């Protein structure tokens, strides 16, 4: 499966619940393994999810920080209670919640996923990912 096909199948395969026939289809399995193997489509998927949340990517240094710092959990009201919330926005940047019973944050200078400086203002979208809105 190539990237174009992966992206064509994204909408139908992300529409849950999937019919049983889809789960078992070779197309679905190829689609999932493409996601595992393709760094570009993984990022494209993140970008789609960020856009679905109504987030303006221009406010974030990269799609990873945007995705992880805007994660909303249905079970936990705040980032210090939820193991899935890996980044929070602070007054001066971004940080990792320190779960020591308080609400402290370990400031980060660089994105843990791509290494971009999080204090810069420009959003970096990798090649091949930027067409997500089209
Ligand atoms: Zn791909
Ligand atoms: Zn949670
Ligand atoms: Zn990043």
Image (cartoon, rainbow, N blue to C red):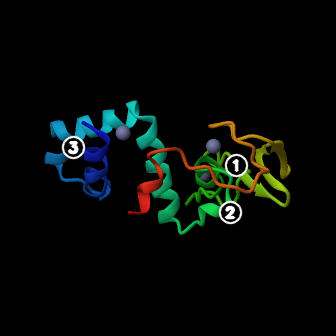
SS at mark 2 in the image: helix
Location of residue 33 in the rendering, given as x and y in whole percent from the top left corner: 32, 33
For residue 35, which quarter of the picture? Answer: top left
Q: Nearer the viewer, mark 2 or mark 3?
A: 2
Asked if marks 2 and 3 touch (Cβ < 8 Å), the reply is no
| In the foreground, 37 or 126 | 126
Q: Does residue 8 appear left or right of residue 94 in this picture?
A: left
Residue 134: image x %, image y %?
38, 63
Q: Position of residue 53 (x, y in %)?
A: 52, 65
Q: Which mark is residue 87?
A: 1
Element class at badge 3: helix
Badge nearest the viewer, 3 or 1: 1
- For label 3, the residue is 23
- How packed mark 1 is, by other alpha carbons closer than 10 Å (few <14, some 14-19, many 20 or more), is many
Q: Residue 105: percent from the left, percent from the top?
A: 83, 47
Label 2, residues with CA under 10 Å away: few <14, some 14-19, many ≥20: few
Gap between marks 2 and 3 measured at Cα: 37 Å
Task: Say which residue appears at 49% left-offset and 44% top-offset.
Answer: 127
Q: Which residue is mark 2?
A: 59
How many numbered discs sit on the rendered protein?
3
Q: In terms of depth relative to the viewer, which is nearer, 34 or 4?
A: 4
CA separation in Å, label 1 and label 2: 15 Å
Q: Mark 1 or 2 closer to N-term? A: 2
For residue 13, side relative to residue 24 (left or right)? right
The residue tagged with tag 1: helix, strand or loop?
Answer: loop
Between discs 2 and 3, the one toward the N terminus: 3
Furthest residue in direction bottom, as rendered = 54
Mark 3 Cα-neighbour bin, 10 Å: few <14, some 14–19, many ≥20: few
């Amino acid at each position: 499966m190539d990237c174009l096909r992966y992206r064509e199948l994204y909408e139908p395969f992300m529409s849950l619940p999937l019919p049983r026939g889809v789960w078992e289809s070779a197309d679905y399995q190829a689609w999932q393994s493409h996601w595992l193997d393709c760094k570009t489509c993984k990022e494209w998927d993140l970008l789609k999810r960020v856009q679905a949340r109504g987030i303006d990517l221009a406010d974030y240094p990269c799609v990873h920080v945007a995705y992880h710092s805007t994660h909303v959990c249905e079970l936990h009201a705040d980032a210090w209670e939820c193991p899935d919330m890996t980044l929070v926005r602070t007054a001066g940047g971004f940080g990792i919640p320190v779960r020591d019973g308080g609400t402290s944050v370990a400031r980060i200078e660089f994105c843990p996923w791509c290494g971009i400086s999080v204090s810069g203002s420009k959003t970096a979208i990798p090649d091949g990912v930027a067409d997500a809105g089209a």
